[in-house]
Image (spheres, coloured by chain):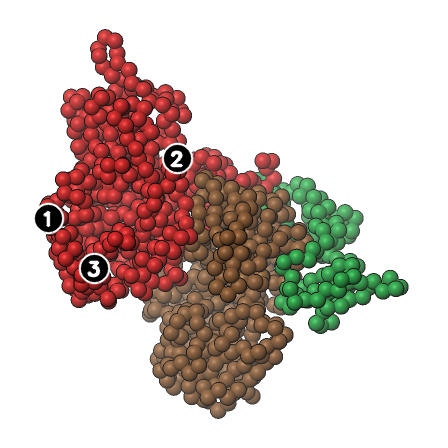
Amino acid sequence: MSKPTPDANHSPDSLVSPDSLTTITCTGCPMGCLVSVTQGPGGEWQFSGAQCPRGDIHARQEITHPVRPLTTLIPVRGSRIPLSVKTSQPVPKALFWDFVDQIHRLELERPIHTGDILAENLLGTGIALLATRTLD
Amino acid sequence: MHDVVIIGAGVIGCAIAREVSRYKLRVLVLDQASDVCEGTSKANSGIIHAGYDATPGTRKAHYNVRGNPLVYQWAQELSVPCQNNTSLVLAFSETDLPRIDALIERGQQNGVTGLRKVSREEVLDREPLVNPAIAGALLAETGGIVSPYGLTIALAEHAAVNGVEFRLNCQVQALAHQTDLDGGQTNFIIETSQGPVQARAIVNAAGVFADRLHNTLSQDTLTITARRGEYWMLDKRIGAQFCATLFQLPTDKGKGILVTPTVEQTLILGPTSDPVPDKMDTRTTAAKLEEILEAAAQTWPGLRKDSFITSFSGLRAHLAEGDFRVGRVPDVPGYYLAAGIESPGLTAAPAIAIDLAELIATDFNLALKPEFLSPPPPIPGFSLKQLADPDELDNLAAEIARDPAMGRMVCRCEQVTEAQIRAAIRRPVGARTLDGIKRRTRANMGRCQGGFCTPRILEILAEELGCDSTDLTKSGGQSRILTGQLGVEA
Amino acid sequence: MKVMPEKVSLVIIGGGPAGLAAALEAQRQGLTDILLIERDQQLGGILNQCIHTGFGLHYFGEELSGPEYADRFSTAFTTAGIACLLESHVLEITPDRVLTVISPLGIRKIAAGAVILAMGCRERPRGALGIPGTRCAGVLTAGMAQRLLNLQGMMPGQSIVILGSGDIGLIMARRLTLEGAKVEAVVELMPYSSGLTRNVVQCLQDYEIPLLLSHTVVETHGRERLIGVTLAPVHPQSRKPDLAQTRFIACDTLLLSVGLIPENELSLGAGVVLDPATRGPRVDQRLGTSQPGIFACGNVLHVHDLVDDVSREAEQAARSAVAFLNETDLPAPQADFSTGRLPDQHLAAPAGWPFPEQPSLLPILAGPGIRSVVPQLISRDRIPETLRLAFRPARVYRSASICLRDGQGQLIIKSQRRILTPGEEARLTIPASHWPAVTAGHWQLSIEV
């Protein structure tokens, strides 16, 4: 996973200031405001371009501590159906692939029930892995 | 050593196989595809032509007219869906009406019965959706529709029941004939992708590829051009609103586009006809698909784009001379040819097969088998119409009690059960691919085009064939459906 | 083996989120004689294969994955002890509500007091688009790929192009990337994505998957398995591809996420009148169809964006069905639901389009800017406390008003929106206070800029 890249999917009429460090698409609603992120003289983050306050909140989260929900599958020995899993909370975006690798390395056996904790403390973050399906 | 090797498992090859299986012979059918009926025979209009179209005196005319009643008869014997829905050739202007008379006259010369000119009113009475601007039409009462793949597969199954061996995924690479020093008898050596095969007689029914094989054996060379015909297919809801096959009177602009219900009640529009250099090139093209819509709208002005299920195309084997070639090949004894079998080839198939089988029997002085086995019963199924009858309903309940899989619906659009899919795999010359299942059961052929049932069909196929799902193909070769399995290294 | 007809008060067809919620609500309303019929081996429907999160925020106030959302309902359903037939397929519903059901256990005829249709929808297949080219392996719908991957652990491909930027397509782009495939591009015919912004960002941008707007696939290549697709930009208005500007993308798989079609073959057999715009039944505010005693909810009625809305809608259908069962002494309203039906499926109603007057039904027309609206009719004899209209805009509007007007063009209610897009079904609530004295004619919903 890498930084969002502005490209064709951004509406052409959105304004992006030329000296912005990056632009972040607000996911709060279908407007998809492009929020320009710059740094003020004191190093503080500045946001512009959003049409409502949610844009700034979202952009701040994205620039300081971006997280992503993570769901994936783990094949389970002896089960035709793979186990679907999710993390107990969204994971830091920078560590996303590390989480995926760690999760895919798990070896599981039935029975497993929805809500079972499959791993307690993934990558030392305190984030757990939960089963989202029951495989009896 | 085989007695007869038939190259090509299309409708012609399978019909010949079925006819020669009446004799005491070891018969082998070879095809490069993964299933019977993978070429021209799977992708055509499925029309039982009356026979007014072909030029009098040609083999096309002869075999068409002889074949017409035979297709109905064979379809009934083999439980293949078929319907005598009649054909109408529409004239769109008063000035075209004399050409209807000319068609009737030509048909009568060919020996076709049941041809007559019908008024605009009668056409609209029969087919209310037809363009009210028509001037009149030719009605061909013997015209009909048949499932082209249904017929081909049923013939293959019947042949197999009577001892014919089918070797699929088997491409013929070279052909040679040699004469024994002592007996003077000719043997053929066929090099294939699965090793050499020897035969006393061979039949070339290789469709668009027949020329390539033929020219390695005979001095009297052939040139076959592949002509591609593209089609649209529409939902059953629409097909049910038509009865007859609707042709357009050919004009200087072209042969016209037909609009016809199929035996499964879908509607097809097409075909175009364009020579293609690559004899496997069955793609569809935007330009031709558009052309079909424009032309078909002349027959059916209410045509709308919202009920399309799919588009497809098939190749026709066109001989430069414009007629079929059927029979012995004078410079190669023991070699028989059925080449250039384009429209009306499906209708002509029974007559062609009967003639060729008789030639072979005469040449080799063959005796009929004392016992010729009946075709296997069709895959058990049911229709909603049937179930309106309480007795039929009770029968189905009894069948489900015997085999619960008969009540487990896999394809919801075409209402195909697990039992039917398993039966399609277990039958003689059974399905090995997703397309094989489709043509034998209609699962995958309906309005969702396999969106729901494919995953389940793959599971059943893998189970029945004892293979991994990842080995399964759409139609053989490299047409794998899945590329891997989670947790399993590729 | 005699097939004897059985009687059931309420039959619910479909055990996905709509059917489960309807069954539970019907029981809460005091009905005991309920039968749910599900064609799969398990309850939950398509949710079982939607392993991503994003479900339940509105209904449960927490973010669940599809299987978890399904599990909440199916557990409640099982605990409630409501009767259910699994692996059972309804072959037919007659207009007088007799069902023919086939399953491995046999065949049944069931006479239902009321029926709730909750069969969901199917994906538009390739053929419906008429994409030219070869018909090789490797072309499949996004939902089928989702089932293969998430329920069977099978990879449908390794290098993938996705046509259509609806949410299923976007979600599958991420799923397949996570399982090791390379998604080469998502191609969208329209100049905007029809998926949620969140999905565009988190499923595409995060993985640097290009989203090619105003493009389409004009040809598939490969004799046996797909080897690539040809793309072309489309004309901004006509949407016709510009074949002078094509480009080839090598890929072994083309996933189609090009729309969902409510699955109404059974409904048609029962004589239910469909709405050409939603392709689901035309319903009144009680979610009753043109056939008395047959109700519809969930994606069989209209395609929803959020399962939470499906659950709520299903509960409404259940309350209406129970009310219908409780008042069967009353004469069923004999109304013609084709009232106010538009002359052409995909066109907005021309102003003042004539339709037969019916005293009992008030049609709500999809006016300019509106692709579809549900409910399409209001039964005047049961005017609700508040009325909620769900509608889909015909295109993207920024800073526009949703206006509901009566037959004389008088404004009933107006609601300002910052953005309206076809990708998100919008809602308009009409409180009882806004109901005018029952008007004649029709109402029309439109978007005014």
Residue type pointed to by label 3: Ala
Q: Are the residues tagged 1 and 3 within 8 Å (C-beta)?
A: no
Please name the residue that numbered disc 3 is placed on.
B91
Q: Quadrant of residue C273?
A: bottom left
Tell us which disc is closer to us: 1 or 3. Answer: 3
Q: Percent from the top left, x then y, of residue C187?
A: 55, 55
| Front in this rendered view, residue C264 or C288 | C264
Q: Are marks 3 and 2 in contact (CB under 8 Å)?
A: no
Q: Colour of chain C?
A: brown
Q: Which residue position is annotated with label 2?
A: B34
Q: Marks 2 and 1: CB-CB under 8 Å? A: no
Instruction: Using the image, name the chain to which the residue with label 2 belongs.
Output: B
Residue A79 percent location from the top left of the image:
56, 43
- The shade of chain A is green
Mark positioned earlier in the residue sequence (3 or 2): 2
Of B82 and B303, nearer the camera is B303
Q: Please identify, in this view, whether the residue under mark 3 or under mark 2 is nearer the observer.
A: 3
Q: Which mark is residue B108?
A: 1
- Name the kind of residue labelled 2 in the image: Ser
For marks 1 and 3, the one nearer the N-term is 3
Q: Nearer the viewer, residue C30 or C73?
A: C73
Q: Residue lying farthest right?
A: A42
Circle 1 packing at 10 Å, graded few (<14), some (14-19), many (20+), is some
For residue B136, above or below residue C331: above
Disc 1 marks a residue whose amino acid type is Gln
Displayed quadrant of residue B117: bottom left
Q: Report whether B454 appears left or right of C398.
A: left
